[in-house]
Image: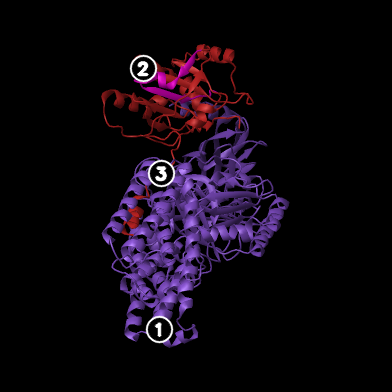
Chain colours: A purple, B red
Amino acid sequence: MCVRRMLNLVSAAWFCLASLSAQAAHTEARLVLAAATARPGDTVLAGVQLRMDPRWHIYWRNPGASGMATKVAWQLPAGITPGAIQWPVPEKLPDEDLTTYIYTNEVVLLVPLKLADDLRPGPLDLKASVSWLECDVQCVPGSAEVEASLGVGNETKPSKDADLLHAWQTKLPKSGEALSARAWWENAAAGKSRYLLLEWKSPTAASEADFFPDASEEFEVQPVTERVPAESGKIRLRKEVKKLAGDWPRQISGVMIQQSGPARLAYEVNLPIESPITIMAANTDSASVTGLVAPSLWKMLLYAFLGGLILNVMPCVLPVIALKILGFVAQAKDERRQVRNLGLIYALGVLASFLVLAGLVIGVKAAGHKAGWGMQFGNPQFLVLLTALVTLVALNLFGVFEINPGARVMDTAGTLASKHGPAGAFFNGVLATILATPCTAPFLGAALGFAFTQSAGIIVLMFVVVALGLASPYVILSWQPAWLKFLPKPGVWMERFKVAMGFPMLATAVWLFSLIPLHYGKRALWLGLFLVILALAAWIYGEFFQRGRAHRGLGLAAALALLVGGYLYAVEGQLRWRSPVPDTSLAGSLKESPDGIDWQRWSPAAVTQARALGRPVFVDFTADWCLTCQANKRIAIDVPSVRAKLKQADAAALLGDYTRLPDDITTELNRYGRAGVPLVLVYSKNPNEPPQVLPEALTPGIVLAALDRAAR
Amino acid sequence: MKHALILLGLFGAVSAAFAAAEVGNPAPDFTATDINGHTHKLSDYSGKIVVLESYNQDCPFCHNHYRTGAMQELQRDLTAKGVVWLLVNSVSPKYPSHRSPEAAKKEWNSQKINATAWLDDSSGKIGKAYGMRTTPDMFVIDQAGVLVYAGAIDDRPSPEGDPRTARNYVRETVQKLQAGQQLAVSQTKPYGCGVKYGS
């Protein structure tokens, strides 16, 4: 072969000079031994010393995206067996899109040589052909024949190079066995790219961490390393793996790197890659959870319950709560058993809706799509239906018509009783759940974020617990009606209160309606007109059918005709509700007002880019239908103090719009253990620090403090 | 209500973002000028197999394929069978390895290159659309315009020796495409030097 011929030529040339070292264009190679003499049976450490000219480099065992690993081919006398090359920790050279792992200036590749027990005493010549690729801007292949002599005798004597070799031994990665390192897939296998999470214990804080993978023909670990939040005392990295051929790898090997103070620590690891579920299950019994990621099941169940409980006072559920309180006032005088039953039926309504939601989440996940809390609000048809439904509820509260279809003329108390009959109670439970979904409450975000990554059984369990949290105040009240004595006595005020509650409900309808143009553009007007027709139909139905004395059938027919006609003309014909307009959002600034925050569209690349420039990055994942997000924006984000701080810190402000549930944002939310928006991240200007994950409900103080930390 | 929940189940059909140049997907179309000033549009070659070769002879890996004559041989064999072979030179003018059209014509003749054309891609537009990472990084596009192979030219990542002894993935892919057989390898890790894009 050509190589051999060339190498022979080279070796012949240097043989004449009787030199022990050989110089290629820019790299000098030399063979050194730790021992001058050794006994049979010993293992002698050999080293191939390579010295490069300034600016030139050679490659590690995994050269990276280009280059070539240095090769050593031994020519050894019988009785000497070389071991594998031990590679000192390389440098990572990010160059354009090609990242390589290299050595500059000098490196000594270490190789243990095993002497046979029956080796005969005497001097031995050890030879090797070393070949490498050396590069600065250009690359040149280089090679050299190197040799060294070793005396075999009855004593082991170190050579003058022993110190050099031992010094390079300390630059080898250490064994990673004590690190409890593990590797697992972040997501299920889909397509050719997948994210791998690597985690290991680190008693000391690390300012930087990285993973240098071994090379493989089957897959490629991408050079970009992301530090993600981990439990305290642990480092967690996220690496993208691209598959080239065959199955997804089951094993990953390489070197874990961490910078702790002045010390650069490196550990050799070879890990089985686990599935996400086994890791989660294993983590549930770890008690020392501090982060949002990989928390214990019990804690998450508690969070789910608390979150459900708190949902009751979130703005989206408040109108329903008012109705419930009214119901209790009306029923306080009723039989205790009846009250209890209604409380339980309400709870059942909540529970049933949550089970439906859980089923949907499982179904959507099984179909290979991303699932998120409040995801139905990204669906235009759902929005149309819900807007109509909430409008009807408001009209009902105004007394335009009654829910009970058989109801005719009724007194106030009767009206309420009918509304809070079994069907009404169940409906209230369902309504409370539906209206709760655009809100996430404190605790709930973490709990649902956990649930959405779990197996079907745990998803159901978590949803049931949230449902119990949401329903619990009413169940308790209905079992302890004595507590209701703190509420005012029933009377005419109740009818007034009911009508008054129609207004927040109407406000909810207006808010829902404001989301419609996003999906239907100017055609949204037709939904507004349909709502008016719907109101008219409801009024005719209530006034002439429910409360009417004569020609009731005519009233019903007129109401139905209006409803059907309005639907066919306005909703089907003009709104064309089954074909929403496509997303036409554009890149660039998303500034809302001239002096507002200069939002740019979020993308992983935008984050990387801003961080590469040493800027802090403020990311707000939000959605038009997310009330908590809107509240955060008004109260704590788009306020003068935060605007000034963003400008002062030269922070990049990135907006991730989740209104239409883009997949890339769902992935990002899941990474931070969230199932839905809001999620606010603040990246430090130090590119190696993981981002701060802010709580769901924000104050300007929280945001300012986070920005201060990030700008430091 | 029930209606709403049924609808709720219907959505979720969020399609994945379309990524550029992925094996199995239609190859990104491009228009480029060759060193003789002729224009080449990928979609004009529809119905033919097209090979793209990320090229820079100053790279020892690439050079070895030409020095040994193996690359010219492969180009001759495949173009004789109706394959369109386009050299894509994406080296930016800021590097000494950049070739002006005159220098390129000289190199074309002295190296006896047998490709269909040498495309000037000093802007890096084609290189980046295909995610060309090294020289040589090879791409095979089938008769229907689908990218069917991307990666190394062969299984012998070395700047020395005879490439004819290696398993050549490009030759294999073209043979199988022309014989209507199932492809065994569709993606490998490219080897070689960096492309030397301008930015």
Query: At x 55% / y 66%, what residue is drawn?
Result: A233
Q: Disc 2 designates what residue?
A: B77
| Residue A630 in picture, x, y percent from top left | 56, 57
- A285 up-or-down from A139: above or below: below
Q: Is mark 2 on a helix, strand or loop?
A: helix
Q: In this view, does A598 lie to the left or right of B30?
A: right
Chain containing the residue with disc 3: A
In the rendered structure, which amino acid carries the disc numbered 1? Ala
Q: Disc 1 designates what residue?
A: A332
Q: Is mark 3 on a helix, strand or loop?
A: helix
Q: Disc 3 designates what residue?
A: A575
Q: What stretch is highlighted in magenta?
A: B38-57
Q: Nearer the viewer, residue A350 or B26?
A: A350
| Residue A259 in picture, x, y percent from top left | 61, 56
Mark 3 crowd level (few <14, some 14–19, many ≥20, 10 Å Cα):
many
Q: Which mark is residue A84?
A: none
| Residue B107 in picture, x, y percent from top left | 54, 15
Residue B25 drawn in magenta: no
